[in-house]
Structure formats: structure tokens, C-alpha cells
Image (spheres, rainbow, N blue to C red):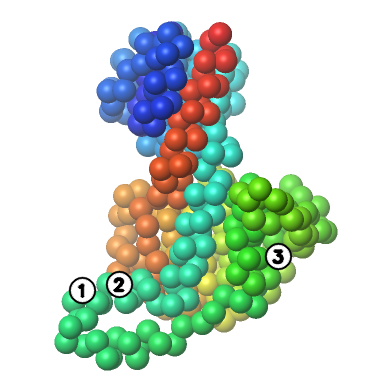
């Protein structure tokens, strides 16, 4: 089979496909050229950059499979593709640890003013070291603070596992999980597993009771955090979004920061990527990363191998 890997793939995944006898093309085809070229392939493998929408599917009747290296499928018209008989594969578990670790890394960074310090040290570190030290010496510890999770799937549970190890309290909301106690693995990457219960509750309680709120939800559902939601939160709350852009209203978030309702912010994702609004980017107290949640060496290898094996099994 001829397979287009359009957004990149770990070399081990490509090698696995080739060893299985498939013709793999890794030359990137721009989005506006796919309509005339995709029909030359039996499968397309993407990450988040390439969009496989209804029109493109209609223009590619020879296409049999769409693969997404990652969790979300919001860049693919999944229902329509399935109606047309196409197979859809993704890699929901491969990047779990990587995204969870980035969430916690951002959390550590914002409570110790690292975004501000990193921006200013290069400019003022030599001449204004003592002043910067004083400004950055008002951080807080995570132990004893409540982390609220909106969405409680694989990544949220892994985030909870790490946060519990830091001494944080966890509450979570997920519309698909009943209120109560949910058992998760603590330190799940170790040889031993210790299970602990996490309380799932309503979204309103997560908003009202959390010191920090982290999103772990798919895109395509509009704003989950907007002006109304920010008004329900504690003063001085922290917001972390390593999930999807467009789930938090950036306008409402900026207003909440300016009013000091929100004290800490970290985001790996944006309403537009690359961002077209630089207001968040210029705020000293905002932790920023360019949508790299799943982009560790280990995750990329797992994603490539898992997706390649799914393709091989399908065409076998």
C-alpha cells in the first residue's frame, strides 16, 4: 500500500511500515495541494497540522485509512470518513505521560515566577539581579493546594498521579463519569502500582474549590472556560491548558488576569496556532510553550510504533 506520512513520524514507525512492505512517502504535501494529490495514496497519517475534512475525503475515493498520531481527532471529519468506509486510527495512550509531565512542569513554573524570571534575566539579570530576586521570592508551594481537573481521561489521571506525589489534593469533573470516587494508579510507570481514589464532582464545584484548574478535554466543543466560569473561581486561581486551543476564551482569560481573578496562567495551546494575538505572549506571569505536550522523544517513538502497527494490522 502507498502511505503518505504528512506531518512527520518517528523513524522507527516508518521503518516498521517499510519492513512490512508498504511504500511510505514522507514528503510533506501542503494542505492546499492535497485535493489533487491525496487520491494517489491508500492511507494518510497526520498529526495536528494536516486537516482531513469532508471535501478532501470526497476528492480521494482511493483513500482507505486515516491515521492520527495523537489523542484528539478534531482535525479529521471522523463521522463522515466512517460513513465512507474509511478506517480511522489514533494513538490515545502513547503521549499520556508526556502531556501530564508538561502540565506539571508548567504548574511548577508559574508558582515560582519562572516565566517572568526567564524573560527578564537575559535583559536585566546582570544589572538588576537583586531586584529580580526580590520580585521572584514570593512563590508558593504546591503541597496542600487543590488541583481541579476538567476532563478525567488518561492524561488527567496521569496528571493527578504526579500531582498527588507532590502532596496536592485532587478533584475532577468529567461529563461522562458519575460523581464519586475513581480509582487511579499512583506512579503508574513504576514496577509496582498503588491505587488511590480521586473524587469526581460537578464542574461548578471544581471551579469554586480549586486553587489550580487544568484542562484535559478534546477540542471542538467551544469555550469550556469563559467569563461566567472565571467568575465562579477563587480569587488568585491558576489556569493550565495543555489540551486544546479554543477551549478557553483568551479574551475572557486576559480580562481575568487583568482583574487579578486569575493569578497564574500556563498554556501550551492557543485559539489560533500560530497565535495571532500577542497579549498573552507578552504577559510576564504566563507560562508559554508552542503546543509541545506530546513532543518528547519517548512519546514520538511510542506514537510512531503504535500507529504503524495499526496500519500494518489493517492492511494485513
Front in this rendered view, residue 292 or 178 = 292
Q: Position of 265 compared to 165: left or right?
A: left
Q: x, y percentage for residue 254?
A: 42, 70
Classify residue 206 by image quadrant: bottom right
**Residue located 74% across and 47% down the image:** 176
Q: Which residue is mark 1?
A: 122
Report if the CB atoms under discs 2 and 1 are less than 8 Å apart.
yes
From where the camera sits, is residue 84 visible?
no
Classify residue 257 by image quadrant: bottom left
**Residue located 66% across and 48% down the image:** 191
Q: CA distance from mark 2 to mark 1?
A: 7 Å
From where the camera sits, is residue 315 visible?
yes
Q: x, y percentage for residue 87?
A: 56, 18
Quarter holding the C terminus is: top right
Q: Which residue is mark 3?
A: 171
Q: CA distance from mark 1 to mark 3?
A: 38 Å
Amino acid at each position: 500500500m502507498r502511505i503518505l506520512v504528512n506531518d512527520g513520524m518517528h523513524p522507527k514507525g516508518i521503518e516498521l511500515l517499510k519492513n512490512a512492505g508498504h511504500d511510505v512517502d514522507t514528503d510533506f504535501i501542503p494542505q492546499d495541494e492535497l485535493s489533487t494529490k491525496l487520491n494517489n495514496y491508500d492511507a494518510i497519517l497526520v498529526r495536528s497540522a494536516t486537516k482531513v475534512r469532508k471535501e478532501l475525503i470526497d476528492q480521494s475515493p482511493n483513500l482507505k485509512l486515516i491515521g492520527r498520531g495523537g489523542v484528539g481527532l478534531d482535525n479529521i471529519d471522523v463521522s463522515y470518513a466512517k460513513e465512507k468506509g474509511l478506517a480511522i486510527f489514533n494513538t490515545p495512550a502513547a503521549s499520556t505521560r508526556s502531556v501530564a509531565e508538561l502540565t506539571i512542569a508548567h504548574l511548577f513554573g508559574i508558582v515560582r515566577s519562572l516565566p517572568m524570571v526567564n524573560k527578564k534575566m537575559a535583559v536585566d539579570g546582570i544589572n538588576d539581579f537583586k531586584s529580580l530576586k526580590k520580585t521572584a521570592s514570593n512563590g508558593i508551594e504546591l503541597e496542600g493546594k487543590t488541583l481541579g481537573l476538567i476532563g478525567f481521561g488518561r492524561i488527567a489521571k496521569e496528571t493527578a498521579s504526579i500531582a498527588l506525589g507532590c502532596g496536592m489534593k485532587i478533584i475532577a469533573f468529567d461529563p461522562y463519569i458519575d460523581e464519586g470516587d475513581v480509582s487511579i494508579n499512583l506512579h503508574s510507570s513504576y514496577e509496582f502500582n498503588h491505587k488511590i481514589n480521586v473524587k469526581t464532582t460537578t464542574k461548578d464545584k471544581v471551579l469554586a474549590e480549586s486553587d489550580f484548574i487544568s484542562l484535559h478535554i478534546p477540542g471542538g466543543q467551544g469555550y469550556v472556560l469563559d467569563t461566567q466560569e472565571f467568575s465562579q473561581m477563587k480569587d488568585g486561581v491558576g489556569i493550565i491548558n495543555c489540551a486544546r486551543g479554543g477551549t478557553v476564551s483568551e479574551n475572557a482569560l486576559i480580562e481575568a488576569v487583568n482583574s487579578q481573578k486569575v493569578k497564574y496562567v500556563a498554556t501550551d495551546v492557543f485559539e489560533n496556532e500560530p497565535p495571532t494575538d500577542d497579549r498573552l505572549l507578552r504577559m510576564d506571569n504566563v507560562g508559554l510553550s508552542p503546543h509541545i505536550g506530546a513532543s518528547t522523544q519517548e512519546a514520538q517513538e511510542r506514537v510512531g510504533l503504535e500507529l504503524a502497527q495499526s496500519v500494518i494490522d489493517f492492511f494485513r
